[in-house]
Amino acid sequence: MISPSEKIQFETVRRAAELPPWAAFDTLAEFLHVVMHPYHDTLPDVRAGLEYAFSDGSDGRDGFAVVAGLDGRLAGAVVFLETGMGGYVPENLLLFVAVDPELRNMGIGRRLIEQALERCDGDVKLHVEPDNPALRLYERIGFTNKYLEMRYSNK
């Protein structure tokens, strides 16, 4: 018997027009917004992140996604932004990663991240809340805690 994780189909996408029908832009944005709860961003912020990732690079914005499908539906996704920098600011930012709650703990999230890391040039950073259970996955993959991030909001 084949497990669901063995039937997962992974696709790397650099432009929104390349998204498979089961991961169309609006579907992907809603999926990321809902499935990442309670560690999610607003839907407009998720859409803005996807627009950045799927830009053509002509204005300095670029990136890609790896989407996972199972039986014609979105099972998971990871989105990377290419920062255009290096050294003190890594070349890549892991922006979003999400797996359908019914398919978690099957290695899909790890496979998404590892496939994306294979496609990256340069270092990768990510932001994660200290109480997010995904923190352990990131550490097992090899991410380390290098800095304490602090922010000032001028809003």
Image (spheres, rainbow, N blue to C red):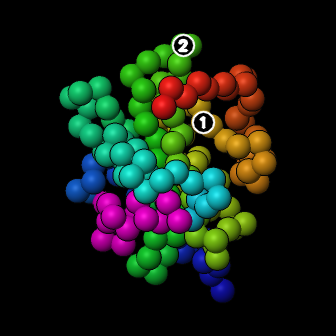
Q: Is residue 47 left or right of residue 150?
A: left
Q: Secondary structure at mark 2?
A: loop
Residue 122 visible somewhere in the drawing = no
Q: x and y percent of residue 24 in the render?
A: 32, 65
Crowding near pointer 1: few (<14 within 10 Å), some, many (20+)?
some
Crowding near pointer 2: few (<14 within 10 Å), some, many (20+)?
few
Q: Secondary structure at mark 1?
A: strand
| Nearer-N-terminus badge (1/2) | 2
The residue depicted at 59 percent of the width and 46 percent of the height is 114
Tell me the kind of residue under disc 2.
Gly
Q: Rounded to the nearest whole Å, what is the CA distance between mark 1 and mark 2?
A: 15 Å
Q: x and y percent of residue 50 in the render?
A: 37, 48
Q: x and y percent of residue 67 in the render?
A: 45, 59
Q: Is residue 73 left or right of residue 151?
A: left
* Secondary structure mostly seen in the magenta stretch: helix
Tell me the kind of residue under disc 1.
Leu
Question: Which residue carries the number 2 mark?
Answer: 87
Q: Nearer the viewer, mark 1 or mark 2?
A: 1
131 above or below 70?
above
Give the magenta part as a residue range.
19-34
Q: x and y percent of residue 6 in the render?
A: 59, 72
Q: Nearer the viewer, residue 40 or 113?
A: 40
Determine which of the numbered discs, if any, sits on residue 126 in the image.
1
The residue depicted at 74 percent of the width and 50 percent of the height is 132
